[in-house]
Amino acid sequence: AQSVTQPDIHITVSEGASLELRCNYSYGATPYLFWYVQSPGQGLQLLLKYFSGDTLVQGIKGFEAEFKRSQSSFNLRKPSVHWSDAAEYFCAVGEDNAGNNRKLIWGLGTSLAVNP
Amino acid sequence: GAVVSQHPSWVICKSGTSVKIECRSLDFQATTMFWYRQFPKQSLMLMATSNEGSKATYEQGVEKDKFLINHASLTLSTLTVTSAHPEDSSFYICSARVSRHNEQFFGPGTRLTVL
């Protein structure tokens, strides 16, 4: 069965430091990969996605992610974290379900705290 | 960008009553809408997928008679929690998508508390 693993439940970084959030997936075919951010009181927002092509994907808010097929990973990175980046981050892989609706399989999320 | 709203944003009800949650795509037509449930500090659990004008497809373990989903139009889907019990208390999130190749856009969620 398809699965997504986010090994880090909680991460704390200092403002201005670099960030890497890990995501590993298990999927038989070429995956559709996503990173979402969830802030309190707000809906999930798509940061970036990978469908095909260049394995280094640029997203919003200065985030990027790199798809590494050999490692089954899609880690999220940001060179300099801002206090407003504190939130919950979810990695997800899209798979086709009955009727080709492509549902998302979610990781458990990584909670990011940013120290001033 | 695409906006999805949910109403209400929070609701408290008594055990045994039914609660309806609305999900609307405000500036696009959604052929598919998804309903998720999220427990505190946990990931999203897909409950069901609904296509406009057809019956919802429920995930394994989700009671379709308890969680009634209606997708009557391309901009509106509703989730009704029937005969709610305290264990149904959770954060319910909907998402909407134009087509299978497009991303899902998420609503802000509805916090349900059943007393």
Image (cartoon, coloured by chain):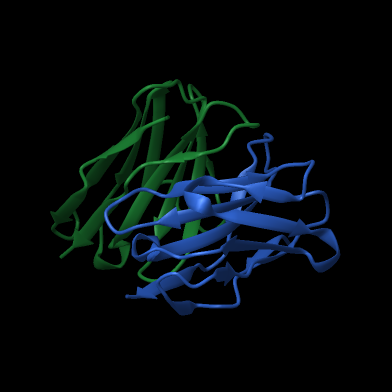
Residue B44 lies, in percent from the top left, at: 47, 59
Q: Quadrant of the N terminus of chain A?
A: bottom right
Judge from the rendering whether residue A60 lies leftward or rightward of residue B99; answer left or right: left
Residue B79 lies, in percent from the top left, at: 34, 41
Residue A8 visible in rendering? yes
Identified at 44% across, 47% down, the residue is A45
Compared to residue A25, the image places residue B75 above or below, namely above
Identified at 37% across, 22% down, the residue is B27
Of residues A48 and B50, the one drawn nearer to the viewer in this rendering: A48
Judge from the rendering whether residue B7 lies leftward or rightward of residue B99; answer left or right: left
> Chain coloured blue: which letter?
A
> Chain coloured green: which letter?
B
Compared to residue B49, the image places residue A108 above or below, namely below
Judge from the rendering whether residue B22 lies leftward or rightward of residue B102; answer left or right: left
Identified at 24% across, 66% down, the residue is B86
Compared to residue A103, the image places residue B24 above or below, namely above
Residue B82 lies, in percent from the top left, at: 28, 48
